[in-house]
Amino acid sequence: MKKNFAIAVIALLSYPSFSQNDIPSKAKALLAKMTLAEKIGQLNLIIPGGAAVTGSVVSSDVENKIKNGQVGGLFGITSPAKVRKAQELAVKGSRLQIPMIFGLDVIHGHKTIFPIPLGLSASWDMGLIEQSARIAATEASADGLNWAFSPMVDIARDARWGRISEGSGEDPYLGGQVAKAMVHGYQGDDLSKNNTIMACVKHFALYGAAEAGREYNTVDMSRIKMYEYYLPPYKAAVDAGAGSIMSSFNEIDGVPATGNKWLLTDLLRKEWGFKGFVVSDYTSLNEMTAHGVGDLQTVSAQSLKAGLDMDMVGEGLLTTLGKSVKEGKVAVADIDKACLRILEAKFKLGLFDDPYRYIDEARTAKDILTPANRQAARNIAAHSMVLLKNNHQVLPLKKSGTIALVGPLADNKRNMLGTWVVAGDWRESVSVLEGIKNVTGNSVNILTAKGANLTDDSLFAKRTNALGIEVEIDTRSPQAMIDEAVAAANQSDMIVAVVGEAADMSGESSSRADISLPASQQNLLKALSKTGKPLVVVLINGRPLTLVWENDHATAILEAWAPGTEAGNAVADVLFGNYNPSGKITATFPRSVGQIPIYYNHKNTGRPFDGTGFPKFKSNYLDESNDPLYPFGYGLSYTSFQYSPVKLSRTVLKGEEKLTASVTLQNTGRYAGEEVVQLYISDPVASVTRSVKDLKGFQKILLQAGETKEISFQITTEQLSFFNYDLKKVWEPGKFVIHIGTNSSEVQSAALQWNK
Ligand code: NOJ
């Protein structure tokens, strides 16, 4: 009997090839052969020790669990050899020979590292963003992996939150476009190909709205705010076909996301039609106990019934579901549903056709960190950089003369990759010093000095260094370091100061209450500024910073983010004009931390402040402006662009008619350059209050010096629609204002009437 069964299973597993339509029936047939314990085993995702952990628990007894059919997938291991060994345990050692899925935090590249996602989004170039994910998928699959814990699409309006670096900033429309591009990049058009991998959209949901920007903190918001501003990027990723989604650490309406039925079933599956599987975040199921909703058995049963399919690391499902079934607290049918979704994902990935499909030792050398991948990383990094200031056109720099290249990040590889890089090796990265030498050859005389520590605060340094030494505190005194940098500056024509954050001063568990440059670096910049030499500040960092002094005193500021493997080359390309910067920030830069949360698509209030003086009893501050330092969508170019007034194809419309709004854009400067032309719409009167304006479209346009182009946007009632009080997406007739411009504050506007 047993033997026949085994033959039947092997026949099933080695079924030559089947169409994607056969998957549900194949998965069901396999499910029918499984014991309850084996079904529960599929819901278990663990991490072997020694891998990149993001919690206090690491899995134990991994080999035996795999052989016993108690593991559905592994994450945190790389290299085909290791993946093969683990897959063999599952396929040769377990009764049903069900292959495992192999995941990893492939966040902004696998081994060729691209800019942090906040930087990627600042490129506003969906083609390049998709390319970065495509390359990441090719490299990750060449390392034996088939599942990426990306894209992270959490909207963030609070720069104190370290993980603002991992997402696309504050705007739901842009966030949705990026989500779509990333999912397509990872998954391609056929998940079963050996160079496409399954995306995992995270963190579902609202994780970016943690109170006070403190990591893992409580989230509480109205449904309208969720639907209008926070949920669209997850929805866009689901619509793009993302195969999996990760539940978040936070609570929603008082129920932790991992056990929230409204979220995981009513919204995700019933309303949005999601067909993939849901995995928890790292022990987020177990953490429901600390949230205060019950013991492990209770929260495991709750989560499964809420719609969770796979449990990351905590093994709550593995260890309690059997008991819960016996006690009648969980139905086998619920376990079946979850198990089926995991099996279906494995069928989609082609793992039942060939469990070793993604394991090809030859590909590692051929596909990873190739010159072409590095070239793409250099190009994408250059496109992500944002020119924040450029007085007297000091940039681009001439490839001659003497430059003082100073700052703790000037000759530094360790911090170029940014946060959340599991497989990338910082030793592969190009420092800014190396990049400048590569780009200028011997034509520029470079004097270097560290000038300052990333921070002199040893406790801050120690906390930043929790995962490895990123901040090294020099044995010299801060003053001696500054003196050296000032001496270099005095002998130079100009100063390039590379300052900012260590890689893990932003990212997970890296919230900051003070988001200015650390004092050591501010002191350096102050001393440099006193020399009177032109001061170009290059920022390497993972979040919007408060930069009022820097903006007042630096001659130029280039926001380079954490640019990735090709950091230095890309910075040099931009500084010396090989690439004319075109990035625009996707998260507002506040003037001071007290303004947070600050974001462009805010409401008007009943007592709006027009920005002048201090009218009492208006919505303003006694001691700070309402305006940000740099608004959403802001970024300069080496050239200049001029916008004509907005032209509308008509000013009165009806029903489903279409509107064309256009501007004439002229490159009025001396260089060819790209401009991100942004379309915003305001709806001044509606049944619920609306934002002052919302981004509804954008186009990235290349214009030669002197060139003029007409830029048009087609507008339909879809772009007028919003979630009303009953959470129905509607548009209401009346007046609308169309704004087109270079950032969310500087726009040309025209009004129209749109009737039903
Ligand atoms: C916790 C993080 O929140 C999540 O983004 C990541 O994918 C997992 N750890 C796995 O490393």
Image (cartoon, rainbow, N blue to C red):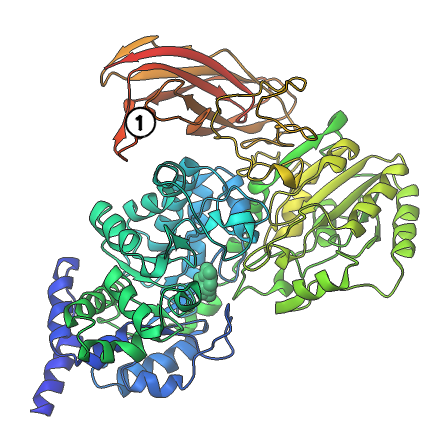
The residue that mark 1 highlights is: 721
Which quarter of the picture shows residue 178?
Answer: top left
Report x, y in % for residue 83: 39, 76
Identity, as a three-letter code, of the amino acid under mark 1: Ser
Tell me: 501 left or right of 266: right
Tell me: 669 left or right of 184: right
Q: Which residue sits at x=55%, y=49%?
A: 213
**Secondary structure of residue under mark 1:** loop
Report x, y in % for residue 712: 40, 19
Tell me: 719 left or right of 581: left
Q: Which residue sits at x=28%, y=72%?
A: 43
Report x, y in % for residue 63: 37, 86
Q: Is residue 405 visible?
A: yes
Q: Is residue 314 above or below residue 464?
A: below
734 or 663: which is nearer to us?
734
Which quarter of the picture shows residue 722?
Answer: top left
* Quadrant position of the N terminus in the picture: bottom left
Report x, y in % for residue 337: 18, 65
Tell me: 442 left or right of 38: right
Q: Which residue sits at x=66%, y=56%?
A: 430
